[in-house]
Amino acid sequence: MFLLLFLLIPVFAAILLLFVKKEQSVNTIAISAALVTLLGAVYIIISKTSSFDAAWLPLLNSRFTLQADGLAKILVLLTAISFPAIFIATSKNQPTQKNIFLSLMLLTQAGLMGVFLAGDALLFYFFWELALIPVYFLCSIWGGEKRIAVTFKFFIYTFLGSLFMLIGIILVYSHTGDQSFALASFKQAHLTSGMQLTAFALFFIAFAIKMPIFPLHTWQPDAYEQSPTAVTMVLSAVMVKMGLYGVIRWLMPLFPTAFIAHSNIVTLLSVIGILYASFIAIRQDDLKRLIAYSSIAHIGLMNAALFSHIQVGVQGVLVQLFSHGINVLGLWIVADIIEQQTGTRSMKDLGGLAKKQPTLAILLVGFAFANIALPLTNAFVGEFLMFNGLFQFNPWMAAAAGVSVILAAIYTLNMVQKIAYGEISAATNLMPAPNKNAQGVLIVLLVIVFFTGVYPQPLFNVTADTLQQLFVK
Amino acid sequence: MNTLEILFYALSAFAVVSAVMVLVSKNPIHSVLCLILVFFAISGHYILLNAQFLAIVNIIVYAGAIMVLFLFVIMLMNIKLDSEPQKKMIIKFIGVLSGGSLLTLLVALVKQTSQLQGKQVLMKEGTIGLIHPLGKALFTDYVLPFEISSVLFLSAMVGAVIIGKK
Amino acid sequence: MKIIIGLIVLWPLVGFLFNGLGRNIWSKKVIAYKATGYIAMSFIFSVLAFLNVQANGAATVHYFDFINTASFKIPFDFKVDALSSLFLLVITGVGTLIHLYSTAYMKDEEAPHYARYFAYLNLFIFSMLLLVLGDNYVIMFIGWEGVGLCSYLLIGYWFTNATYNYAAKKAFIMNRIGDLGFLLAIFWLIVKLGTVSYGTVLTAESLAKLSTTDITGITLLLFVGAMGKSAQIPLYTWLPDAMAGPTPVSALIHAATMVTAGIYMITRSNILFSASEFTQHVVAIVGLSTALLAATIAIKQNDIKKVLAYSTVSQLGYMFLGLGVGAYSGAVFHVITHAFFKALLFLGAGSVIHAMHHEQDIRKMGGLKSKLPITHITFLIGCIAIAGVPPFSGFFSKDEILAAAFAKSPIYWFLGVVGAAMTAFYMFRLYATTFLGQFRGTQDQEHHLHESPVAMTLPLILLAIASAIAGAIGVPELMGGHHWLSHQLAPIVGEAQEAALSHQTEWTLMAVSVTIAVVALLIALSIYRKKADGEPQTALGKFLYNKWYIDELYENAILNPLNKFAGFLKEVVEKNVIDGAVNGTGKLVQYSARQIRLLQSGQVGYYILFMVLSMILLFVIWFNDIAILRFLFQLTHKS
Amino acid sequence: MNAIIISAFMGVVMMFSSWGTSSIKLQRNIGLLGMLLLIGANIAHLTGVWVIEFDTKGMLVFNRIGLYANTILFVLTFIYMWINGEEIDKVGDHTHTADYYAIFFFILCGVSVLTSFDNLLMLFIGIEILSIPLYILTGADKKNLFSNEASLKYFLMGAFSTGILLLGITFIYGATGSFHLTAPVINPTTNMPVEHFLMSAGLILLFVALNFKVSAAPFHFWTPDVYDGAPTVFTSFMATVVKAAGFIAFIRVFEIQREALGYSWFIILPFVIVSTLLVGNITAVFQRSVKRMLAYSSIAQAGFMLFALYGRSIFNNEAILLYIVAYSLATIGVFAVLVKMKDYSFESFNGLAKKHPALALLTTIFLFSLAGIPLTAGFFAKYFMLNALLTAGAGLWLLIVAIVFAAVSVFYYFRLVQAMYFTSGEPAINEIDKKYEFKLWLIAAILIVLGVFPSLLFNYLYF
Amino acid sequence: MPIQYYIFLCLTLFSIGVVGVLTRRNAIIVFMCIELMLNAVNLLLVAFSKMYHGAALQVSPASTAGIDAQIFVFFIMVVAAAEVSVGLAIIVMMFRNTHSVDINFLNRLKN
């Protein structure tokens, strides 16, 4: 029953927001709703596994099942952290009709929570789409210049992907013993190996587009660039995790044979994608695009580690799901402050941030190092384990993917250098007083970065049961 | 070849020729008249088949009422008789070709149908085409469609009111 | 013990947090005292730890599990043994002196930046301590990357200068290349052994589990890591550029401590390296080549710090030669002595630069002997020590390596001696040009020349003393010493293999190398005591002056192609191929939309025609056996 | 049977109501009352109460599905009339309200026949009762050349397809000697239907004619022009209730009969489905007029509904019923917004969200339902269809084609969303009162409720 | 008379009707051709009716088998009449507005 709150709180707050116009109260409502959700998330992290189950579609034998295992918990926590962070960090931004903006954001949150908690395939699909719709509106209304075309591409791309998944769901559903959508029944569906391959492909297309995996990634940089930054934060911190979540939650347990059979090719694709995105990131001048490509590379690594199907690597992914979210969120918040205050994202116009706003520069540097997985930052733990798994799977692939470690250093340091260092540029000089709210959020996030970097054990403990389910038969 | 056969062939030839004339005659009035001839030929066939009721109805309703209506409309419109624009030759050719292919296909089908082999049509005899059995059937087994077709007429009537009213 | 070791590491961390978080709060004085004080505390605890090791032997302490998953575990353990306790002493000792020195050297900086400087420096010490104290490769790797990070931050300390930033970035990236090697080696170990703790990895049992390929692969990868951190060919070019940082940083990081991490790592894993003949050769050859290459370049450099930087690279090469020939304790010995004299030299150079108002070109110096007496004396001691003149420390350590090299192959020895001669030559070229002869700088500079404050000279004096006498810890039995260091390290690296050489040979070798070094230094003195180098004239001179054009080679052979490749991916592949395919699909839909629309011509005649044709098509689809042909056949062959 | 009698009766009442009263409002209310009466009568029939005991002599067979579909269609018509009342008055020369309602009732009589016929004669008469009034409705805007043109086109093509239909029925009669829908003769040795070419040819002709009625490609050509040219309110009716009735008839004919076609059914039906999806979706992408886009979209939706014919899985009936409801409600909703627009170009919707946020939201919900986005009934409609298809053993490729085109459909539905929300401009829209908006909200609410609990629709199907 | 003959005749007439629809531009003539198609169907129905009647007579002399087809023809005629009235009304309406009955002019609605 408790889990239902993760859906209800954001939805109620979203509806409430529609009727509130005053800016101050709009912010307050959104932030407090998000914070309450965060409290809830912290509670389920420390509490035992809980679940919720209610009848929904008796005709189809689909139930409204929510369940929180380690994987769900960690992503719920990430979502719950991200939204208040985003709301507070961007509370100074002034989009038109802010109440609707925030309302849609909260709906997105509800959708994401649903995706991560759903224990029923049809419900999962539902939330999968529902998380997308508000984002479509958010991006198209409040985005950049080319927002309509870009968002549309993004929408159609992901929508097509999810339709493939829908077929996959129907396919598996029709082969379940009890004609049910429950995750447990899906796991016991009688699929021939050929059927597994097909269903695997159908599911994977949806996940691959969402992550995204090379070469299905081209919607992402454009979408990140054109979306309002608050949305970009959601997209890259939480939404891309939907794909990885899907792989862990559905692909791995449902289609073990097909999963193993495809692991080589998918891993190879991911590794190519890692290098490809890293190389492109080196040449980016647009701050947002750079982070976007960097994110593609990181997600590629996570996917590669998943498909290598080595326990250590998967453990790494489970941790990294959370860590990457925090890191990239931090980077986006910094990017947002810079864009809001200087009016540009082009790194060649920036410079001297360390002189103008030292604190922000330090925070930027902090997240930059987290982005390149420096030890004692959270990303190191995940990446170390993931590379480890990948190495066990195939040393050469690990070595190739490892090159991205170097490339990441190149582009991240380029970014740091161009933004923070050097003399104060004309654009940087325009920056007003530091944005205290955002910096506060960043500091909290940075504390999380270093805490989980030094002592990641809580993350391991939370995800232990998922790992157990995946690997211990 | 007995009389029936001769009559059959004659009527068939007559019907087909008249039908073709409907197509080829440039003057719409001629077309109407040719079509009336086709209907007469078909009525002749009905008589051959001893479907007397239908033969009469065909003459009255079709050749009489409907075609007169056509004729009336054509007259009313007072279209310049010989200047009806023609379709391009190529379209006509394609039209004939498709009609021909359709015919070929259907004929081929019928020839392939083993169940129809050797089936004979009862000529002259049989009483079902007479008005008495037909009337009886119409008002017993087929009274429902008969009643419902009145709805059709009603709606056509309303339609004529809607469309025809200035 | 657990607390002592913990505190060694914690003090610098506290210093970092104190300075980092309080940079806008504290005054410069507080910052300076605290920063230096924390490192001094760390030093004191290091001494305690050292004594403890002396008394009770090695100890491992467990704090918490860094990573503990179902299948795999990395404890956060520290280990103090002879090797790490020695390194602790060097790091914290030299570290303390350099902190002290820095308080004066950096006094012109504003308080927040001053704090930032010390925060970085403290963080560096923290990382370095993690590196040496860690009980497994992962902890070592954490420190390993941490020191790289601090190096990056400190090289780019003056962040408004683009060149410095570039140098910083270059340092970090080159280090990262090495780090990747290290990381892969760690993974390899994990795959094969399932653990990274020294206690299990570095044992004979583990060695037995590894095939030759494994060992060679792992050691080569580890060596790649060492190459990056310790500036060996081909990853050495960052170190000279790293001189962009403040001079004390160069002394601490790029001379005394961080760059020796590679030596520490290989010494730590000596069991593995000794097991692979091939790797040992590679290490020796790379070390020797680096030693010679850097030495040749140093001969023609005019920037006081650059000379010292190439000298460092060269000396590191020596150490790797030592490692490659199996003289692990010799290498460590050289690390220690080198830490003293190279820190001394850098700090001396810093003192000179300080006096000269940030002038670094030795051609514009000269005759500083009288103006900066303490600096002069200590610098001279440093030069003698590095040149390998007995009884200064450098002699003993270098000799131990050369002797071991001779035992392995006379060619190694010969080339080593050539390198030593060059070392003597360029060091005394540096010394002579800087301190002897006439002052060649501006009036203004001359007017302001003065000896540095005591906070700077005190470290110089202490380090000079250390440079002079540190050889004592490794005086070979041959010369009546106890070879204390070698015995110290014996539990870790095994007994030194001196026995391979007869005493006769050893004495001869020593004599030859010392003679050649002295001759070289005298030549240098005689050439440069009056005048400085002009622009290089000869082709060779230019070649050396331009550092073998290695930077240009890297630029053109690696960086530019990669950059072009990245540009190609971005502009061509991404835009036209991949996105092109996606957008192309959209375009295709729109194109076909426009075409199919035309079917809807508006002509009812066409519509019906299409309907009839479609109907025929349906019939054909359904009637797809050759019914029509059969029918046509029947028509023509009517019986 | 109740429905047929009452609808015919109500038609007559409406015909004469213009004599009895000149108040258009009263006429309208009589119509709505009649609709309620009709729905009541039909529900009475569902529960077994007959107005007049009548022996249909096997002409009609009333089963639960048919009656339930009938009820649904009546309710849809009621909603349609309720919302569009004022717009219906305005069509043509503003004097024919009663006549239009009369025609609606006659059409519903045809619908009732089509949901219960068991004899091809009744099929023929039902289709004609459905079609002939439609020709008139299409041309109801007499002064409008588009309306005239559409009407004539519709009439000519409709009459032609009647010819095809009759030839098909004749063939079937020739093969079986009966007009009754009967199971094909099974050869006991092969357990396959006996091959009878005449029967098959008849079925194919019937298939063609019915495809024409439900506007499936490649027999769809009349649809865009007629839907475009007809008065917009009537397009709404034609595209929803009438088309749905066509599908019910289609299924009734082919549920069993198609066995006679053997496996070739699984060649010709996919052919039609794929071409319908292709033509409908692709052509809709490039339309400038929203009305015409909706016409193509209705072709595309027909492609999805044809899936119900693919197999005889138990899900078919549910799928088609839900699809009819989802599709019809959403279409009625969109058209109800459309009739309020001054012109039908996409540009006229620009900035609607700013001026009428509620209306824009409503339109979006309708479009989402059409596109099959979750939380709207359209999603489950598509879902049930795909499920039925898969259960019927269709190849996966057919499903993939279906979803690819579903994705394409997002292309054009969302163009309208983009215009409303993301493009600034002054919407060309007439005044809309709260009452009208409320009615639209009701539709949206039904769509969403069915989008969350689709089972509600079926609870009464099997009690 | 073999049934095939009737079928061929009717199909010929039907196809002539189809060809007429396809080749003529005058809406009235097109409509007439459609009527021709219907008549062809009528004749075929009657022929089938008599075919089944003939077969049934051999079993039972009182059989009325086949009568349904003739009734059907009757209904076709009924419907055709209704259709003609509506169709001609539409054509006349069209003519009043455009003064033409040429279907090629019906091209305002397209694409």
Image (cartoon, coloured by chain):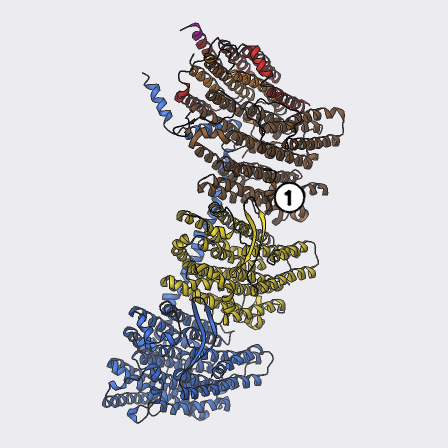
The image shows residue B45 at horizontal and vertical percentages of 49, 11
| Residue D269 included in the magenta stretch of the image | no
The quadrant holding residue D343 is top right
Q: Residue at x 52, y 73 (%)?
A: C160
Number of numbered markers:
1
Q: Is residue D86 left or right of residue C348?
A: right
Left or right of residue B159, residue B81 in this image: left
Crowdedness of circle 1 by 10 Å Cα count: few (<14), some, many (20+)?
Answer: many
> Where are the magenta residues, as a range?
B1-7
Q: Identify the colour of chain E in the image.
A: orange
Quadrant, the N terminus of chain A? bottom right
Which sits in the foreground, A75 or D166?
A75
- Percent from the top left, x then y, of residue B155? 64, 23
Compared with residue D224, is residue A436 higher up or lower down, i.e. above or below? below
Chain D shade: brown
Residue nearest the observer in this picture, C140 or C566: C140
Which lettered chain is shown in yellow?
A
Which secondary structure is most common in the magenta stretch?
Answer: helix
Q: Residue B3 colored magenta?
A: yes
Residue B45 visible within the image: yes
Quick one: which chain is red?
B
Q: Secondary structure at mark 1?
A: helix
Locate residue C540, reporting x and y percent: 31, 77
Q: What residue appears at the point 51 percent right and 80 percent down from the top-left corner?
A: C10
> What kind of residue is marked 1?
Ala
Position of B39 relative to C9 (above/below):
above
Q: Is residue D289 visible?
A: no
Quarter of the image containing the C terminus of chain A? bottom left
Which chain gets the blue colouring?
A: C
In the rendered view, would you say A376 is above or below B133?
below
| Residue identified by numbered label 1 | D444
